[in-house]
Amino acid sequence: MSLFFVFSSGSQAFGYGAPPAQSSANNYTLEIYSDNESYNLGDTITFSGTVNKYDERRNLRISIFDSNNNFILTQKTSVNTDGTFLHSILLNEKFFDGKFIVKAQYGTSQAPVKKMSFEINSNDVTMEEKLTSVKIPDWIKNNAGWWADGLIDDNSFVEGLQFLIKEGLMEIPATEQGSVSNDNKIPDWIKNNAGWWADGLIDDNSFVQGIQFLIKEGLMKISN
């Protein structure tokens, strides 16, 4: 049997065997934000924020769950001495279209959890938005220059364009492709655009838009 003694002096009481002092974990709070509210698969989401007080022994843990509370991933990041943090996560094959919940804690499991959310909406991206980020490999531009100079034939150049479409750098719906001959014979005047692009006189986006127009008009054939 345990004993508990209390000594009273005026309004003060001192006890032996009293419960330990409350943990200070709840004192470590944080704020967290994302650089956008909506993303596409393959994008990078960047989290930033602050903690109310810095502790060199603590790390910030960022965990992500889907809308059904299924765990996706968790990562740790350090906090700067001024209480700020910055951490980026690639939205790779673990993710999919939908809403995701972010839970962040600074320190132990007893620390308060800060929640936020973001969405992945790949289907909401317009063709115009995709074109703004078009980056075509340099070897395709070399091919365009050689084609404009007559050093490679039409079929060789079209094979390069087929690569762009296969890799998703150009999006040409099959229903919009016009009917042309099977030999991929392209009018000579079109080579001017390819030459200008190869020489840096027009940018990637302008070149892609021009090729899309030619395919839709049936002036160029791209096989699926």
Image: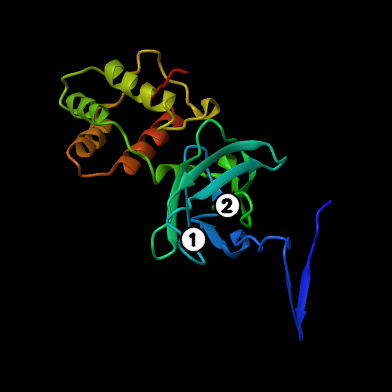
Q: Distance between the residues labelled 1 and 2?
A: 11 Å
Q: Is residue 102 left or right of residue 147?
A: right
Label 1: few (<14), some (14–19) or many (≥20) C-alpha neighbours in 10 Å: some
Picture residue at 38% right of the left edge, 22% below the top: 162
Task: Identify residue type, mark 2.
Answer: Ala
**Residue 86, image x, y percentages:** 43, 54
Across and down, in percent, residue 210 comes to 36, 38
Query: Is disc 1 in contact with disc 2, using a CB cutoff of under 8 Å?
Result: yes
Counting from the top left corner in percent of width and height, residue 172 is at 47, 30
Looking at this rendering, what residue extends furthest in the right direction? 1
Circle 1 is placed at which residue position? 49
Q: Residue at x 35, y 25 (%)?
A: 161
Q: Badge 2: few (under 14), some or many (20 or more) residues near its Cα, within 10 Å?
A: many
Q: Work out whether residue 44 can be spotted.
A: no
Could you say which quadrant of the image residue 202 lies in?
Answer: top left
Checking the image for residue 85, the label placed there is none
Residue 70 appears in the picture as rendered: yes
Kindly state the secondary structure of the residue where label 2 is placed: strand
In depth, the one of 128 and 17 nearer the eye is 17
N-terminal of the two: label 1 or label 2?
Answer: 1
- Give the percent coordinates (x, y) of residue 77: 45, 48
Q: Nearer the viewer, residue 39 or 133?
A: 39
Local secondary structure at mark 1: strand
Residue 70 versus residue 132 in the image, above or below: above
Is residue 43 positioned above or below 170 on the image? below
Q: Determine the residue located farthest toward the top in the rendered image.
A: 182
Left or right, 187 with reference to 105: left
The residue labelled by disc 2 is 104
Q: Which of 38 and 76 is in front in this view?
A: 76
For residue 148, above or below residue 132: above
Tell me which amino acid carries mark 1. Gly
